[in-house]
Image (cartoon, grey):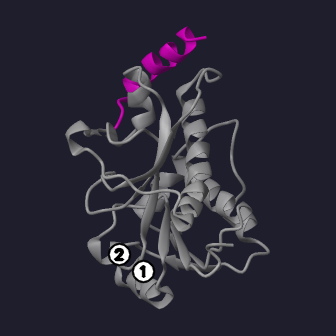
């Protein structure tokens, strides 16, 4: 395996569905994960309990995913604090993979020798920021997912891999969000293999095309669902 000698660390919150899906996909793809650093007992971890919450899909629990693996699991109170930095210095990872974290400080970003990878459920650079699946549908643009390197900005690092998704079978916003999340997990594994094989060369984002999107208003979710219904 081309990445067997690489050190990879995942950072996530245990409740984040996208993070769990990414970790599960990495393990199934036989990508060696040395450690997972979990932020818990924080406002972030509480908020992610409802991230992508739905009545029809839920991946395996974190404990089920790491069961029977040799992955080291560490719990920290904050991903940007010294405790995390010390762990990362100890592991000296080639790659850090994010599965739902806060905005990271430069002191964290610098610990990854080859970079930090993030999965963004939208097509960059146009759709940076929050709730981009909803904004994309509202604007009648292609829905998709992007894997990119982290830099000091928000969703602004070099693009590694991106693909659009077919949403013709989706009738609600949450269905599209789940589908985008699954695409994020799929692309993360492809991105690692592509980078290490030399088949993928990251592309710098054209920041002139970038739009920072705010949180999507709850009163517009009905409008998005109506758009999805009309496309059927």
Front disc: 2 or 1 = 2
Mark 2 nearby-residue class (10 Å; few <14, some 14–19, many ≥20)? some
Vertical comparison of 115 with 214: above or below: below
Residue at coordinates 26% horizontally, 40% vertically from top-left? 210
Q: In which quarter of the image is residue 16?
A: bottom right
Residue at coordinates 40% horizontally, 56% vertically from top-left? 202
Q: Which of 218 and 187 is in front in this view?
A: 187
Q: Where is residue 228 in the image (x, y as percent from the top left)?
A: 53, 17
C-beta proximity under 8 Å, tags 2 and 1: yes
* Outermost residue to the right: 68
Q: Is residue 223 magenta?
A: yes
**Disc 1: which residue:** 84
Q: Give the overall secondary structure of the magenta segment.
A: helix
The region drawn magenta spans 215-232
Q: Which mark is residue 142?
A: none
**Disc 2: which residue:** 108
Q: In this view, does 193 lie to the left or right of 152?
A: right
Q: Position of residue 74 (x, y in %)?
A: 56, 80
Mark 1 nearby-residue class (10 Å; few <14, some 14–19, many ≥20)? many
Q: Which of 41 and 118 is in front in this view?
A: 118
């Amino acid at each position: 395996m081309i990445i067997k000698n690489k050190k990879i660390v995942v950072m996530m919150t245990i409740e984040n569905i996208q993070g769990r899906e990414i970790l599960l996909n990495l393990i199934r793809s036989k990508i060696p994960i040395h450690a997972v650093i979990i932020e818990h007992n924080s406002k972030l971890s509480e908020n992610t309990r409802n991230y992508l919450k739905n009545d029809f899909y839920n991946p395996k629990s974190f404990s089920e995913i790491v069961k029977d693996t040799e992955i080291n699991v560490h719990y920290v109170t904050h991903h940007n604090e010294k405790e995390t930095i010390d762990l990362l210095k100890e592991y000296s990872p080639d790659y850090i993979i994010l599965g739902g974290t806060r905005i990271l400080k430069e002191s964290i970003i610098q610990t990854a020798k080859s970079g930090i990878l993030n999965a963004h459920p939208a097509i960059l650079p146009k759709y940076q920021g929050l709730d981009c699946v909803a904004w994309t549908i509202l604007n009648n643009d292609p829905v998709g997912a992007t894997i990119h390197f982290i830099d000091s900005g928000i969703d602004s690092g070099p693009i590694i891999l991106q693909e659009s998704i077919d949403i013709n079978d989706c009738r609600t916003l949450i269905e599209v969000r789940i589908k985008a999340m699954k695409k994020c997990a799929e692309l993360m594994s492809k991105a690692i293999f592509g980078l290490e094989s030399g088949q993928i060369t990251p592309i710098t984002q054209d920041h002139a095309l970038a739009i920072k999107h705010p949180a999507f208003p709850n009163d517009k979710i009905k409008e998005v669902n109506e758009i999805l219904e009309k496309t059927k």
